[in-house]
Amino acid sequence: MATPAIRMFRRLEGLFCVYKPSGVHWKLVRDSIEANLLKGLNVTLSQPLPQEVRFLPHPESGTAAPKELTLSAASIPVLSKHPLVTGPEFQHIRVGVGHRLDAFSSGVLVLAVGNGNKALNNLYKTRITRDYTLQGEFGTATNDFSHMGRVVERSTYGHITQDKLDRVLAVLQGANQKALLMYSNVDMHSQEAYEMAVQGLLGPEGKSLPILIGLRCTHFELPNFTLEVQCINETQKYLCKVVHEIGLELRSTAVCTGVRRTRDGPFTLQDALIHHHWTATDVMQAIQHYHFSKKKILKDSL
């Protein structure tokens, strides 16, 4: 018979996402959530201790010494099954992490509990895309393309306009669209390619170089600017380099001052749990919500 803790763990198995703040390593996020889940599982009401029958000496009244030992049957708890003896019921649970975010970046971080790790691997085998918001600043170049790196060059940026920036972004996106078609491993003149393109399934097979699917400027106020990026197989280091290359194309320099992931596959910022909600109860609700939404999408597609 399953204990309350085991029944609770079964409801915890699945996928969910959290909001990783900037300046925090993803391993610390995972370890904090794992500790909170273990705490939530082990504080559940435990089953009563099993009883066993033992024959105990029957207490004798009076001062006269008994001539023979009298035993009586008694039901007593099995202390070897007590939590103080056996320790916590759950001492480790497997919490998997999806596409990583470095310490500099923030945003949606997908996690999996228990058997959800298999579903996490299957999710990333599909052609899922991710959305980012990039903050950039013209006029400076650093050794790691971020504002936290060592400054290696300074330049002017007064000649840059939003129209010039938009033209550079259009050229960059066009080059990446060609790369997307090249890595798709599909005949571009076939009906299959057309149907995949209509359904948004056109993409690289397995591992490929980072590809930018969408790229646009949402805010421009020199020297600062904001980009929205949709991409596949990217790293945050690569996105910072993109900002640096945009500065070079505009005959200036630029550094990335912020990377924020707003979507990872089906998970968005609205689904992400903030630090105060990294508890077993909130994680369980988030996993159940994902299961419900997934079933609803499958039902609507039939």
Image (cartoon, rainbow, N blue to C red):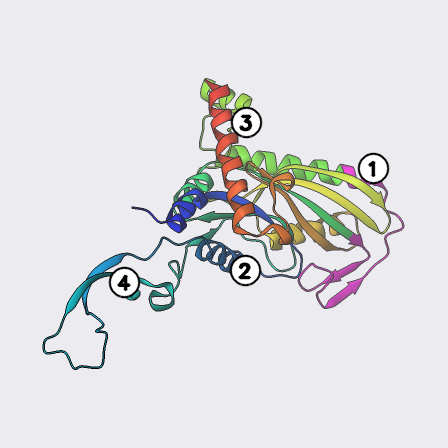
Residue type, label 1: Asp
On the image, the x and y values in percent for residue 183 come to 49, 37
Residue type, label 3: Gly
* Image quadrant assignment for residue 76: bottom left
| Residue for badge 4 | 78
Helix, strand or loop status at disc 3: loop
What residue span does the magenta drawing correspond to?
A: 137-166
| Residue for badge 3 | 200
First in residue order: circle 4 vs circle 3: 4
* Image quadrant assignment for residue 10: top left
Please tell me whether mark 4 or mark 1 is closer to you in this view: 4
Helix, strand or loop status at disc 1: helix
| Residue for badge 2 | 32
Quarter occupied by the C terminus: top left
Q: CA distance from mark 1 to mark 3?
A: 29 Å
Please tell me whether mark 2 or mark 3 is closer to you in this view: 2
* Image quadrant assignment for residue 169: top right
10 Å crowding of disc 2: few (<14), some (14-19), many (20+):
some
Q: CA distance from mark 4 to mark 1?
A: 78 Å
Q: CA distance from mark 1 to mark 2?
A: 45 Å
